[in-house]
Image (cartoon, rainbow, N blue to C red):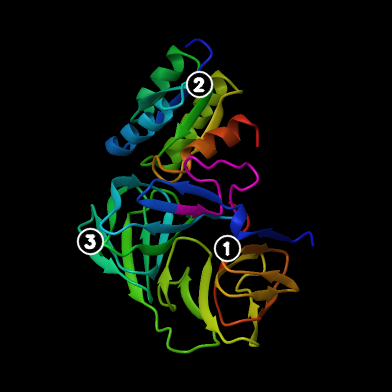
Amino acid sequence: MKNTIIHRANTRGVADLGWLKSYQTFSFSGYYNPERMRFGVLRVLNDDIVDGSKGFGDHPHDNMEIISIPLQGELVHKDSMGNEAVIKPGEIQVMSAGTGIYHTEFNKNDTEPVKFLQIWVYPNKRNVTPRYDQIAIPFNERNVLHQILSPNTDDNGVWIYQNAWFNMGEFDAGKEINYQLNDKANGVYVFVLNGDITVNGQHLNTRDGMGLWDTDQLNIKANTDTQVLLMEVPMEL
Amino acid sequence: MENQIQILVVCTHEGIMATILRLIGNNTAWHAVGATDVAETKDLLKLKHFDVVLLGNGLTEKEEADIVDFAKVRNSNTKIIYHFGGGSGLLFGEIHEELAGK
């Protein structure tokens, strides 16, 4: 199919710094693959594992919408706007880096690793005032998609400076859902957190990713118990 | 080095500027200098040729447009990069992509 791209889990870039293992769907830092630069405005999808008590020291960001989704363990966040927070599974954190922000991220636990997704989306506006937000997502219902991000301040989930919508859900084997795009001009990047699914006839396994565009809906079937993340984003910068 | 790619980084944030210059400096094929406002940027563009102008954070759209116009008038081959992320993991990819003409 011309309007799809599949990134198998084992084709991602890998950065191993000892304390950090990062599986990178798109080019990042030392991993450069011109065929893997972005999916629309989705620029970074890093699947990070940080050792106990370790983390990222003080470092800057600007002009990027940065979303962190913890999958296991707890992450301590501190930033130059005075925010200090701990994020854990069931929560989502967003920073609009805008004109510039410094932050640190450390594993709260001394011995157990923390696992989280770090997702960067190009903003639709440069040099905005930096902002931080963190919310709990009520993942109490299985077999439905939960909206965790949108462009709207008064909608479910966090909001960002971009015409993007993220949804997450856990599904029992055999369940099937259809996802209707919010904006038909957007594409959707499906990332399998766990399990085995079929998306529009394409079979995907744990940590596989699949981008689809020029479509207004997609069909997802859970072949096993599964957890998925859907990232609907504009295809043009 | 004589054949280094010359990069002019424009950024108002001191810390981010330092990070970008340090990261670019790690690549011996590239050489970067920084400017923190439009006037300094134009002065540097008058002084020497730059292969790349990398627009970092803190400039208004008007200032960015002014710099782009000025750089292109002096040398239409100068490549303009709108940097995102703040001297982060995207920097090398942005420069490589632009130099490759993508």
Check if mark 3's residue and mark 1's residue have beta carbons within 8 Å: no
Please determine whether, in this image, residue A141 is positioned above or below residue A182.
Answer: below
Please state which of the two labelled residues, at mark 3 or mark 2, is closer to the viewer.
Answer: 2
Please determine whether, in this image, residue B97 is positioned above or below residue A39.
Answer: above
Residue at (43% x, 12% y) in the render: B47
For the view shown, which residue lies furthest in the right direction? Answer: A1
Which residue is under mark 2? B29
Residue type, numbered disc 2: Ala
Which residue is under mark 3? A83
The total number of labels drawn is: 3
Residue type, numbered disc 1: Val
Residue at (36% x, 41% y) in the render: B58
The image position of residue B29, as x and y in percent, is 50, 21
Viewer-nearest residue: A170 or A41: A170
Q: What element carries label 1?
A: strand
Q: How far apart are marks 3 and 1 (CA)?
A: 28 Å
Residue type, numbered disc 3: Asn
